[in-house]
């Protein structure tokens, strides 16, 4: 396994452990990350409420649920996140619901961006440290296969268009973004990720068939 990913997995957290970390820090009026501020703590508090709501209300549609259960490979989703990140708060509960639907085909582990700079630098978006970033790892070979993030297409387009028009992201843009997530209900994210996983599953199966051929 590539050493950077190995180190990240060693210090990673489960979804439940990540949620507890964010909650415990908020009790001390802190956020995750190397920088601390009233603003970041405020965002972490908002995100805590968002994740609590999404954990209760999010569903995996039957069609996607069936596709997840048809995956043949075994995977780890290594997610780079921070408690103050609004996109992460909207997306990690979606990831978790898909993992639960996988019936142990997928395991999710979470690391904090500021604690894993080397890993983050390998998965930049337009040279920026945008999160969350989901890294798909083959559990059998420990190799990184693909990555997804930091946003589904519709949300990314919204932010890109807003930047072009206004030059920067402000509170109005953030409000519009979270409204998009609320209306979408995690569906676009689930569709994009399951399509990626199906493609990866086919690639792994093809490689295994090739290995079987050359073994004789």
Image: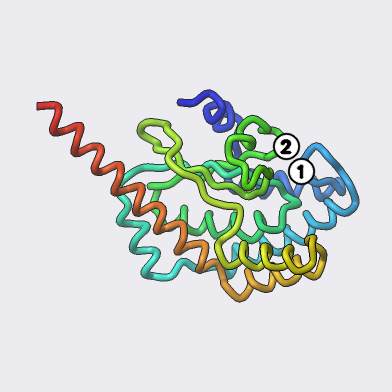
| Placement of 45 over or under 58, stated as above or below | above
Label 2: how many Cα within 10 Å (few below 14, some 14–19, many 20+): some
Residue holding disc 2: 114
Q: Compute the Cα span from label 2 to label 1.
A: 9 Å
Image side of residue 47 versus residue 39, left or right: left
Which x, y percent locates residue 163? 74, 63
The answer to which quarter of the image holds residue 17 is: top right
Number of disc labels: 2
Q: Which residue sits at x=64%, y=61%?
A: 90
User: Which colour assignment does the render follow?
Assistant: rainbow
Q: Quadrant of the N terminus?
A: top left
If you read the primary sequence from the N terminus, does the residue marked by circle 2 or circle 1 appear first?
1
Q: Which residue sits at x=16%, y=33%?
A: 212
Q: Which residue sits at x=61%, y=76%?
A: 183
| Placement of 156 over or under 208, stated as above or below | below
Which x, y percent locates residue 121? 63, 35
Residue holding disc 1: 32
Q: Which residue sits at x=52%, y=62%?
A: 189
Q: Secondary structure at mark 1?
A: loop
CB atoms at circles 2 and 1 under 8 Å apart?
yes
Q: Nearer the viewer, residue 97 or 178?
A: 178
User: Looking at this rendering, what residue extends furthest in the left direction?
Assistant: 216
Q: Quadrant of the C terminus?
A: top left
Image side of residue 51 versus residue 174, left or right: left
Image side of residue 212 versus residue 7, left or right: left
Q: Nearer the viewer, residue 172 or 23?
A: 172
Which x, y percent locates residue 23? 75, 50
């Amino acid at each position: 396994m590539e050493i950077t990913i190995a180190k990240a997995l060693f210090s990673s957290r489960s979804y439940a452990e990540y949620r507890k970390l964010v909650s415990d820090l908020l009790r001390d009026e802190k956020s995750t990350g190397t920088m601390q501020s009233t603003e970041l703590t405020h965002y972490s508090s908002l995100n805590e409420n968002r994740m609590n709501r999404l954990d209760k209300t999010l569903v995996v549609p039957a069609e996607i649920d069936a596709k997840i259960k048809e995956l043949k490979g075994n995977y780890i989703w290594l997610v780079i996140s921070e408690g103050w990140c609004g996109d992460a708060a909207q997306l990690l509960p979606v990831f978790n619901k898909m993992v639960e639907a996988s019936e142990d085909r997928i395991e999710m582990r979470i690391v904090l961006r500021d604690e894993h700079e080397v890993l983050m630098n390998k998965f930049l978006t337009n040279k920026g440290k945008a999160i969350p970033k989901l890294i798909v790892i083959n559990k059998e070979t420990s190799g990184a296969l693909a990555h997804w993030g930091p946003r589904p297409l519709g949300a990314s387009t919204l932010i890109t268009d807003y930047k072009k028009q206004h030059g920067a992201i402000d509170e109005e843009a953030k409000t519009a973004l979270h409204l998009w997530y609320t209306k979408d209900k995690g569906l676009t994210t689930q569709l994009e990720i399951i399509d990626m996983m199906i493609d990866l599953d086919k690639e792994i199966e093809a490689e295994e068939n090739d290995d079987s051929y050359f073994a004789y």
